[in-house]
Amino acid sequence: MRLARLEMALENGAVVVPPAGDIVVWRPRTGDDLSVLPRERVVVRTGFKPDYDYFKAQGYRMESDAKAGLAVVCLPRAKREARALLAQAAAGLADGGLIVVDGQKTDGVDTILKDCRALGLHVGEALAKAHGRLAVVTPGPALAEWAAQPLQVEGGFQTLPSVFSADGPDRGSMLLAAALPEKLPARVADLGAGWGYLSRAILARNGVKELDLVEAEADALDCARVNIPDPRARFHWADATTFKPARFWEAVVMNPPFHTTRDADPALGLAFFKAAQRGLAPNGILYLVANRHLPYEKTLVTLFKDVGEIGGDSGFRVIRAAYPIRAR
């Protein structure tokens, strides 16, 4: 989808590649095709580890200190995050640099372009293709108003607009934190730790000596470092579904994501469960929360010997799964 819009914009002259300088592509997703841009000049900027690894494996540069002549912003779904990303892209441009804004209609691209006009920015004609739009925005000082600012939320936590549940702990995490036993084993992991809400609850339990916070979103992990100033905590910028601990954990806690797009993707949660199964000691225990409508139990009973519900409400269930089943 992104390739089709970029290609059309380059062919009809709506987007002109500057003769020199970096072209920074902000937040492309795994599978996005950037081949219409000159590879040797492209710098991919993303804090999401699976996407970072994908583009790095293709040979793209992932860092640059130089000011860019052109920025391509792949809009995320959240409005505040999208605004902050535009401000960040503008700050990295050389004088005269332009921003190409690209996004799906369902992710609010029309609203963002309207907001750019309201800031007094010049927005070129929007090209529509593949259920999305692309337009060139001429940046201005007003974009600095959209720069990401840390948020202080319930419980004294710090978040950023780019992180999940930036306005405070989500209902599922609160239910899981409340259901955790008063004592936990010595070695624990929080898979998909986010900005650290569950990690703080884990470290408040008796018995915990080491906690691995594994989180794929760099901004969220940076917030967790602020929120969890505890020497027992170890922070890992990594894809939780492929992360391998140095030693087996004795317990894993998780509120796994279940969206890769707007539609639920149960396979993502299942990948988290399998990562916990691989990383747990033979007597290890997994504590998780999930939406009631997701069909997780059928898989959990193939991965763990003892699976049961220990809490929840009408929308969520908190599950304890103990004794991982090892493949023979």
Image (cartoon, rainbow, N blue to C red):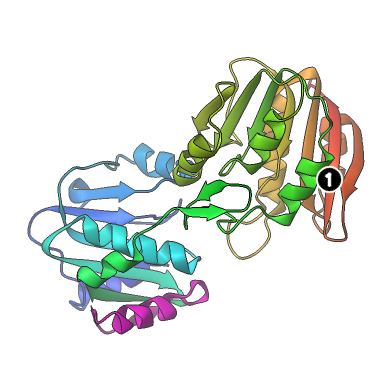
Q: Nearer the viewer, residue 19 or 322?
A: 322
* Farthest-out residue, front: 156
Q: Is residue 230 left or right of residue 37?
A: right
* Farthest-out residue, left: 19
Q: Is residue 280 left or right of residue 45?
A: right
Q: Nearer the viewer, residue 304 or 257?
A: 257
Residue at the (68%, 60%) spot, across then down? 264
**175 is higher (above) or lower (below) than 136:** above
Which residue is tagged 1? 318
**93 is higher (above) or lower (below) than 46:** below
Residue 57 rendering spot, x and y as whole percentages: 37, 37
Q: Tell me if residue 315 can be seen.
A: yes
Residue 86 rendering spot, x and y as whole percentages: 32, 64
Q: Amino acid at mark 1?
A: Val
Disc 1: CA contacts within 10 A as few (<14), some (14-19) or many (>=20): many
Res 116 → quadrant: bottom left
Res 178 → quadrant: top right
> Is 61 one of the magenta-colored residues?
no
Q: Is residue 185 left or right of residue 112?
A: right
Q: Tell me if residue 75 can be seen.
A: no
* Farthest-out residue, top: 247
Q: Secondary structure at mark 1?
A: strand
**241 is higher (above) or lower (below) than 90:** above
**278 is higher (above) or lower (below) than 55:** above
Which quadrant of the figure contains the C terminus? top right
Q: Is residue 225 left or right of residue 73?
A: right
Residue at the (59%, 40%) spot, across then down? 196
Which quadrant of the figure contains the N terminus? bottom left
Res 176 → quadrant: top right
Residue at the (68%, 45%) spot, across then down? 256
Which residue range is magenta in the image? 105-130
